[in-house]
Image (cartoon, coloured by chain):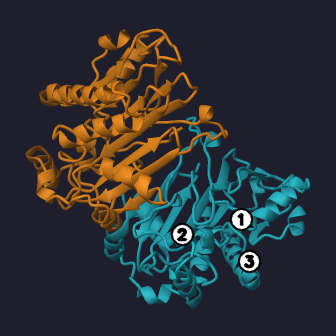
Chain colours: A orange, B cyan
Amino acid sequence: MIWSRIKVASVTVASNSRRTAAAMLPVLVVHGGAGDVPTQRAELSCAGVREAARAGYALLRSGRSAMDAVVEAVTLLENNPAFNAGCGSVLNEHGGVEMDALVMDGRTLASGAVSAVRRIANPVQLARLVMEKTQHLCLTAEGASKFARAVGVPEVPEETLITDYARKRWQRNLQPGSNPVECQMGKMGTVGAVAVDSEGNVACATSTGGMLNKMEGRVGDTPCVVVIKWKYTLCQSWLTCIRGVKLQSWRAAANAGLTPVLEGHTVGKFHSSSGGPQCLRVKLRSWRGHSGCGFNSGPGGGTAAAG
Amino acid sequence: MIWSRIKVASVTVASNSRRTAAAMLPVLVVHGGAGDVPTQRAELSCAGVREAARAGYALLRSGRSAMDAVVEAVTLLENNPAFNAGCGSVLNEHGGVEMDALVMDGRTLASGAVSAVRRIANPVQLARLVMEKTQHLCLTAEGASKFARAVGVPEVPEETLITDYARKRWQRNLQPGSNPVECQMGKMGTVGAVAVDSEGNVACATSTGGMLNKMEGRVGDTPCVVVIKWKYTLCQSWLTCIRGVKLQSWRAAANAGLTPVLEGHTVGKFHSSSGGPQCLRVKLRSWRGHSGCGFNSGPGGGTAAAG
């Protein structure tokens, strides 16, 4: 498989048996965020992505849904201080943590999101509750917190979400002459996962702390549902949250003809193509005809659409 | 012109001279929100849309930009209690006003938005300031309010945004047996405007109070930028904020072959086609090759992308 030739902090777990609708084996793709992983954190990041992929895939193999799997995987990434989501999120200009997350279910075309939410350990789980327990697509800021309290999701002290690494980066950006935008580039971005379960249904989830030293209340594209191309049938709708890490490696691989494709895969094909300087697209198509395409718009950003 | 045969609370102001790039005459389209206008409010709504269209178009004729024109038009709609934006916004479940707005500039591909913002008379103007004075695309809730204070935008008492009509609808929805979703359907939705100026540049703006009796912190798709189809050139990007009012009239017109098209227009063509039960798409193409397509996703919602 060509993936082994490309150093990326993302993991695909899937069967390699022949495609049969009657005995479908699931697939899960997990990523740890766009941008170059600093060398000293590469091992941690890769281990975290592997752990999340294995945990989510174990659920899929036990017959659980794609939604269960992606939420489980992203929950583990949020709990892992190595990633810019949940504990480990980058800090805003005031040194606080505000997080965005989204889930989408290709089976029902439902989605849920939270933006600029504070003091929640697992925003991805709260996003799922927005999808399941409200008539809305997105709740923001204090409104999201009130909803969390109403459905029994506990608040956590903000300090428990802040790592020494995040605080040091934030402090460095407060120094005279610092360039927050430059510092942001190349660092770990939004995390996410996409899965196809044994029923052939797709689901995805993303979560992020956003941009380093962002203004209070800044919302990126992570919690935004984007219906890119709607043609009234599931098979023509799109799904995202597949992101590339080590973008330069991916692009170098593509330039060298090493297109990362799982040809003849049980569940679907996995394509990658590079776009602009900060753009990476990945496409997934399931045996049921559901297809998904994700792209990252740079560290700390991302856009999602599901079917 | 076929528009006169269709009763809609939207106005197009434009020249009908021949297309010449050297002496371009501008165009402005203003709408007052998706959904049926209650009969007793139809006259008020149509007068408000006409007033906004004339004010915005006066700016265009004096050489001002498309962005100036759409912000002016939407500002007037926000100030007009007949519309669900600014003063006149629908109330959330707690009887408060939370508003979303977005602007997009096709010349620079810049955009700015605010979501769930409170106590601001003209969210569309604040959205423009987000575009012009920050590195972010969207600020939400209290963060947006703090930004407003920082740039000198005054807060207004929430009571000044609440009309008797809005309060009565909110109270009716609190009564036993009421159905907030049903009550929302068919009422005035998000307002907006799109323009092409004498330079051939496009811009758009939207503003809304959202859904009646929505949960606190609910964010719809109004403040979400959607890059539907990006092909590295301006001429392939999209722009929205053109919405239909009196959807049933539009669809009935389309069914009867009365497609509302300004053929041979100085600046571009104006197309309409109906989608799903709550979907309307409108497309605009300027002489410079900029094209825009907008659709409404039902009352209180909307999606925007610009180029």
What secondary structure is found at the residue carrying circle 1? strand
Residue A305 tag number = none
Residue at the (58%, 36%) spot, across then down: A237
Q: Earlier in the sequence, mark 2 or mark 3?
A: 3
Chain containing mark 2:
B
What secondary structure is found at the residue carrying circle 3? helix
Q: Which residue is mark 1?
A: B29
Q: Earlier in the sequence, mark 1 or mark 2?
A: 1
Residue projecting furthest to the left: A164
C-alpha separation, residue under disc 2 versus residue under disc 3: 24 Å
Placement of A211 over or under B131, stated as above or below: above
Chain containing mark 3:
B
Residue at the (41%, 23%) spot, across then down: A26
What secondary structure is found at the residue carrying circle 2? loop
Q: Position of residue B189 (x, y in %)?
A: 62, 69
Q: Which residue is mark 2?
A: B211
Image quadrant containing the N terminus of chain A: top left
Q: Circles 1 and 2: CB distance less than 8 Å?
A: no
Q: Which residue is mark 3?
A: B50
Residue type marked 2: Met
Placement of A95 over or under B141, stated as above or below: above
Residue type marked 3: Arg
